[in-house]
Image (cartoon, rainbow, N blue to C red):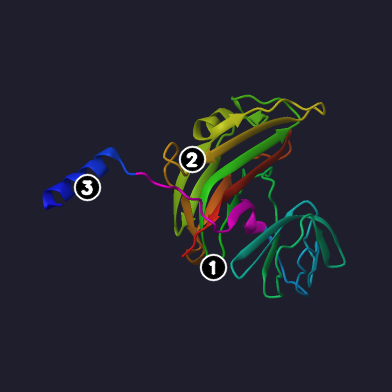
Amino acid sequence: MTTTEIMNNVYNAISKGLDVALQDQTSDIIDYYMLDKVNAVELTLFESTVVDGKTLTVVDDTGVVAGRALEISENGHVFQAIVLSVVDNVITVNAPFDTIFTVDAVCVVAEWNMIVDGSTTSRIFSVAPPVGVKWDITRINMTMTATAAMDDSKFGSLDALTNGVVLRKKNGEVKNIFVVSDNGGIAERCYDADYPTKVPAEIYAFRARRTFGGQDKNGVVVRLDGSESEELQIIIQDALSGGTLTKFAVVAQGHVVEG
């Protein structure tokens, strides 16, 4: 085959497109609540956890409250569960431990429900990988529940917010992704925003999903480097507590970056 023929074959392959086989990754899944770690209770384990166990003993349980999230990380592995009870430094959670965490593990209990008052001092909820680990966040899921009706002019069931809720990435500097003040604004920035049918107990709900990866979306993921203290943050700048809104939670999903 001549050089000209080879070049023509290459040109035809490029111009017509090449078959590409896409294969999913096999790294660990990221699926975590964004937590108020600024106001978290830091804990020291008294002894190592047991795989499939649902209790852990800490040196001091002061400040631990049932209903909040427990997060433990060690050797690049992160575990989250909801605290069911705390008695005499023994904390019971709702999910079995999937690895052994030693007394050297980083352990905190923090708020996951964003129904807080951020009007005077902003409250920051975040998700971040451990040091030495990188995460690619591909999407976030937002859910709200309330005891009053919702529509696009409200934030959940509340009046539209004055300052709004901010989604941003922090990596030494900060990069705002969006700010929203009402459900309509969330729908403009997210995908699959909807109001599920009200349940008989008069609970109203709103859900939305913002996907970053995929060419029909942003076409990029949000990469977080734990060694650079990078975080994905939600900032609450208004008073969300004290009204008819009962839950506002955000979950970040993605995968661990290999290599």
Q: Residue at x 59, y 67 (%)?
A: 76
- In the figure, is residue 6 to the left or right of 121? left
x, y percent for residue 158 = 66, 31
Tag 2 residue? 178
Q: Residue furthest front?
A: 1
Label 2 is placed on what type of residue? Phe
The residue range painted magenta reads 19-39
Q: Earlier in the sequence, mark 1 or mark 3?
A: 3
Q: Is 153 in the magenta?
A: no
Q: Residues within 10 Å of mark 3 (few under 14, many from 20)?
A: few
- The residue located at (54%, 54%) in the rendering is 255
Choose mark 1 or mark 3, whichever is in front: 3
Quadrant of the rendered image containing residue 101: bottom right
Residue carrying label 1: 131
Residue at 53 percent across and 52 percent down: it is 232
Instruction: In the rendered structure, find residue 10 and report the number of the disc placed on it.
Output: 3
User: In 3D space, how far apart are the residues under numbered discs 2 and 3 (Cα atoms)?
Assistant: 43 Å
Viewer-side label of 1, 2: 1
> On the rendered structure, is 73 left or right of 1?
right
How far apart are the alpha carbons under marks 1 and 3?
A: 45 Å
Query: Does the rendering let one see residue 164?
Result: no
Image depth: mark 2 or mark 3 in front: 3
- Given the image, on which type of amino acid does mark 1 rest? Val
